[in-house]
Image: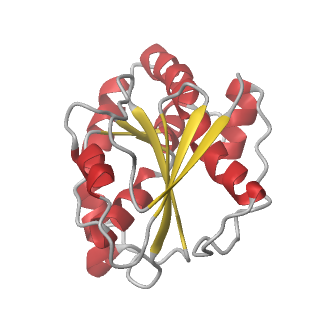
Amino acid sequence: MSTTIHLHTGDLPAGLAFPNGVAVDSETLGLKPHRDRLCLVQLSGGDGVAHLVQIRPGAMPQRLVALLSDPQTLKIFHFARFDIAVFAKHLKVETNPIYCTKIASKLARTYTDRHGLKDLCAELLSVDLSKQQQSSDWAATTLSDAQQAYAASDVLHLHSLKARLDMMLAREGRTALAEASFGYLPIRAHMDLAGFDDMDIFSH
């Protein structure tokens, strides 16, 4: 499948629709939502097209926010817990409904402890993802072609991963467990923002 990348400044263009759900990822200046601002949001409908939205300080991307909160559009993430916490903090939006390939992998692929996106793509899709731009200045006014390609790669394969993981979850009888876990994610994200990010409240 060929890849097309569209870079947008400030918000998504009008008229975009994602009838088969939308894969979503984000890039920030670091891994602390309270400290590090949201710089980029990546989206794909699973069709080889990636839309990258550069978030400008002080400007609210209204169409993006509407999509994230649209109850009719499934949002597919890898490690949704972080992204939806960032969106809640910086975009003031509750993201729903959610599917997380990392959670699905942990429930379905119990034969391994390797649940990173690169590992999933390699095993399930025979795709080798480059992580060379993982540490990068995402707040730069102009994003390099390498940055754009890296950002797009984080969403282009999530639909295919979901399809494979759904089959594995069904095979192991864990679909309901996965769905319940996805439903809990917004609460987990708010707990992270409230300062309980390093605590397992269910432990003894």
Furthest residue in direction front, as rendered: 14
Q: Residue 164's x, y, as percent?
A: 56, 21
Q: Would residue 8 appear left or right of 181 to someone viewing this image? A: right
Whole-percent x and y of residue 172?
46, 19
Quadrant in which the N terminus is drawn: top right
Q: Is residue 29 visible?
A: yes
Quarter the C terminus occupies:
bottom left
Q: Nearer the viewer, residue 49 or 195?
A: 49
Q: Is residue 27 left or right of residue 140?
A: left
Depth check, front residue: 55 or 120: 55
Q: For the image shown, how many numbered marks are present on the structure? A: 0
**Residue at left offset 73%, top offset 30%:** 123
Q: Which residue appears at 50% of the width and 27% of the height? A: 162
| Colour setup of the view | secondary structure
As drawn, which residue projects farthest toward the bottom? 35
Q: Position of residue 44 (x, y in %)?
A: 50, 37
Whether 60 is drawn above or below 80: the answer is below
* Picture residue at 55% right of the left edge, 34% below the top: 158
Task: Give percent across and percent down for residue 28.
Answer: 52, 70
Which quarter of the picture shows residue 2? top right
Viewer-proximal residue, 1 or 182?
A: 1
Instruction: Report the residue that reaches farthest toward the left.
Output: 71
